[in-house]
Amino acid sequence: MPWNRDVALVDKTPLHGPYALLSFRHPEVAREARPGQFVMIKAGLSAEPPLRRPYSILSTDPARESFTLFLKGVGQGSRGLKEMGVGDLAQCLGPLGRPFSLPASEEEALMVAGGYGIAPFFMMSRELQNASSSGRVFYGGRTSGDIQLREAFEALGMPLVAATEDGSVGFRGRVTEPLERHLDSTRTAVRLYACGPDAMLRAVASIAERRGLACEVSLDPWMGCGVGTCLGCVVWIRRAEDAKPKYRCACTEGPVFDSRVVVW
Amino acid sequence: MVPSLAVEIAGVRLKNPLIAASGTFGYGVEYEGLLDLSTLGGIVSKGLYLEPRDGCSTPRIVETPSGLLNAIGLQGVGVRNFVRDVLPRLAGHDTALFVNVCGDSIEEYAEVSRILDAAPGVAGVEINISCPNVKKGGMAFGGDPRMTAEVVAAVRKATRLPVIPKLSPNVADIAVFARVCEENGADAVSCINTLLGMVVDVETRRPRLAFGTGGLSGPAIRPIAVRMTWQAARAVKIPVLGIGGISTASDALEFMIAGARAVQIGTANFVDPAVYDRVLAGLREYLARHGHADIGSVVGSLEFPDESRA
């Protein structure tokens, strides 16, 4: 169940370029959030910008009653958050949405991220480590500056393969190329998870379909409310029981969907 | 002494003047668990046609300075599904439920209203003659006084429930439309729906919304809404429900002082589900500070001698 609170910023770590880590005190999110869930949040208590923004939760710390967001300060909402000082208040509603499902014990979780889509996979990696499940992260960006948090994944002992379009870090090319190479070489049962730009999600979904693999994608349409009332974030979904596709809210029925039900 | 916030609209007693506006509060059940629905004076449901609707293509919403432009296009479950699946879930909450009624034709407005007339737990119908995001119906009815008259009269004949047309601000003189509603049997009017607007992406040279145009809401439209509420309230004897960018007690009071008997909170629902608690606390504080025992004494109390207008 989501909780609506004014939350204090308790920690802030600027990262390379526009990126930053922000931690807020929110006991319920810290206790209940699952990998793939998100919060609706905006800096300060003022009228601008009008709406809160959705952010995937990077990690939670139940002992400190806090959660951490990974954000790229590019728009009005994210810049406002990035400019907050420790102790400042933000308006926050969460945890929201349907989380990723965890893999079966014999399956390897292959987590494919693009840009700030890496966020939910840090929390997921922790869960996998706690459950002694195996996983691997494929992390794509345009250039080296988009590949953040590698040390954090290393510290967890989670294997991470980076790919950049300009080749400045890791594999040169799209993140789906090292993913396909791994799929070609592995004999382990796998389950795919993807979070990032739509084009990347579509590419991963089509790889999954071609190879007959289970795949979950986290969609990121414009959201107004986070609770299914503004109907701004609808996506075409066709479940087995649906005679035709239906507009469904990504905020309440997603953001995580089985890739096979998404009408791309 | 605790000031009384209760108001009466079209024979329906509301425990306070705050009503959730149509299209911003789902069918109410979405907010169960997040807030106590009994805190609200009332709820107006998302607009309903006879049949379910998909609504507009995406993108459907875009933020604007102090506002929100939307073209949702009345996605909904249809009135029969609403009566069967949603109404029973709302029965346990102590709040007045109004249902927003849509139609592609006058007959459809009447038929939806007839179905609601027979349904338990509905306090009244709000007639949507002002949605800017549908090709038929909607604003087409609310932008023409003759059509407005026909829709209101047809709904009036179809139900014994209080009938509350929701007026469009996209007209030259809203007082004309308020009077037409009153003359054709409306019990109150909601004032206003969204203002027709457009946002252009200069890189792609396309409208930001798939529908092209959309309805503007939020604090950006409040002064226009207050002005139109004032004009409508002076034109009719039936109550006016003020709507437009309300997110604080002061905002709500502007409308009530200008003549609104109650107010609807819209876009602010998306921003902060705790808005009702904050506004109610602010209203109580205001009444106590000004020595009013009853919110009713604020309504229409605007100090504005007409002769001072040149």
Image (cartoon, helix red, strand yellow):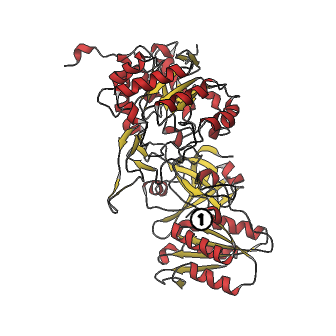
Q: How many marks?
A: 1
**Which residue lies under the disc numbered 1?**
A119
Q: Residues within 10 Å of mark 1 (few under 14, many from 20)?
A: many
Q: Is residue B303 above or below residue A40?
A: above
Q: Is residue B87 left or right of residue B159?
A: right
Residue at left 54%, top 75%? A140
| Kind of residue at disc 1 | Ala
The image shows residue B284 at horizontal and vertical percentages of 53, 22
Which residue occupies the foreground of this view, A217 or A33?
A217
Which residue occupies the foreground of this view, B144 or B163?
B144
Residue at left 63%, top 41%? B30
Q: Chain of mark 1?
A: A
| Displayed quadrant of residue B254 | top left
Q: Judge whether residue B278 can be spotted in this image.
A: no
The image shows residue A22 at horizontal and vertical percentages of 56, 59
The image shows residue B250 at horizontal and vertical percentages of 44, 28
Q: Is residue A49 left or right of residue A227?
A: left
Q: Is residue B82 above or below residue B181?
A: below
The image shows residue A192 at horizontal and vertical percentages of 67, 72
Q: Is residue B164 left or right of residue A258?
A: left
Q: Judge whether residue A92 can be spotted in this image.
A: yes
Q: Is residue B105 above or below residue B309?
A: below
Q: Is residue B171 left or right of residue A81?
A: left
| Displayed quadrant of residue A257 | bottom right
Which residue occupies the foreground of this view, B205 or A109?
B205
Q: Which residue is farthest front?
A: B107
**Which quadrant is home to the C terminus of chain A?**
bottom right
Q: Which residue is farthest left?
A: B310
| Circle 1: element type | helix
